[in-house]
Amino acid sequence: QVDLVESGGGSVKAGGSLRLSCVVSSAIDIDRCVAWFRQAPGKEREGIGGIELHYVPTYYDDSVKGRFTISKDAAKHTVYLQMNNLKPEDSGMYFCAAKGGEDIVCFTSDRPADFTHWGQGMQVAVSS
């Protein structure tokens, strides 16, 4: 079962922008925490941030603040990751994920293990 479907990845030059979309299954409450993660080769999966009922993003990685923006359109069951001023070090696999069960709130301490539903992952490649 595909719970979250991602789109919008690709290759860009440094300084460019991409917007990733995560369409959340109707079986998942869009108001629960849906977060973005990324993983570069040889590195651990890193949380970028999440968004839930209160529409105020919780960013796990302060280094992307000011460049990356998480938003959602509940009517479209979609969570977005707008990435501006991309850098080569932003390259990697990007995943959206949602919490399961009764866990609906994002916390700054969230880790991948806190999420039960995952998208398929999208490659983002940023060249110099």
Image (cartoon, helix red, strand yellow):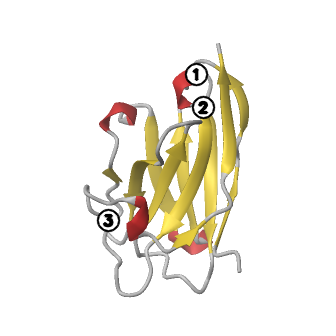
Q: Are marks 1 and 3 in contact (CB under 8 Å)?
A: no
Other-residue count near label 3 (Cα within 10 Å), few / some / many at <14 / 14–19 / ≥20: many
Residue drawn at (61%, 61%) of the image: 22
Residue named by callout 3: 106
The amino acid on which the numbered mark 3 sits, given as a three-letter code, is Cys
At which x and y percent is residue 118?
Answer: 58, 67
Rendered view: 115 above or below 66: below
Quadrant where the N terminus is found in the figure? bottom right
Provide the residue designation for mark 2: 91
Q: Residues within 10 Å of mark 2 (few under 14, many from 20)?
A: many
Give the x, y percent position of residue 106.
Answer: 32, 65
- Marks 2 and 1 in Cβ contact (< 8 Å): yes
The residue sitting at the top extreme is: 128
| Res 74 seen here | yes
Q: Tag 1, which secondary structure?
A: helix
Q: Amino acid at mark 1?
A: Pro
**Mark 1 lies on residue:** 88
In the rendered structure, the answer to whether residue 51 lies left or right of residue 28 reads left
Quadrant hosting residue 90: top right
Pick the residue in front: 17 or 75: 17
C-alpha separation, residue under disc 2 versus residue under disc 1: 6 Å
Q: Report how far apart the C-alphas of labels 3 and 2 lie in the structure.
A: 24 Å
Residue sitting at x 54%, y 43%: 39
Amino acid type, residue under disc 2 in the picture: Ser
Query: Residue at point 41% right, 75% down?
Result: 32
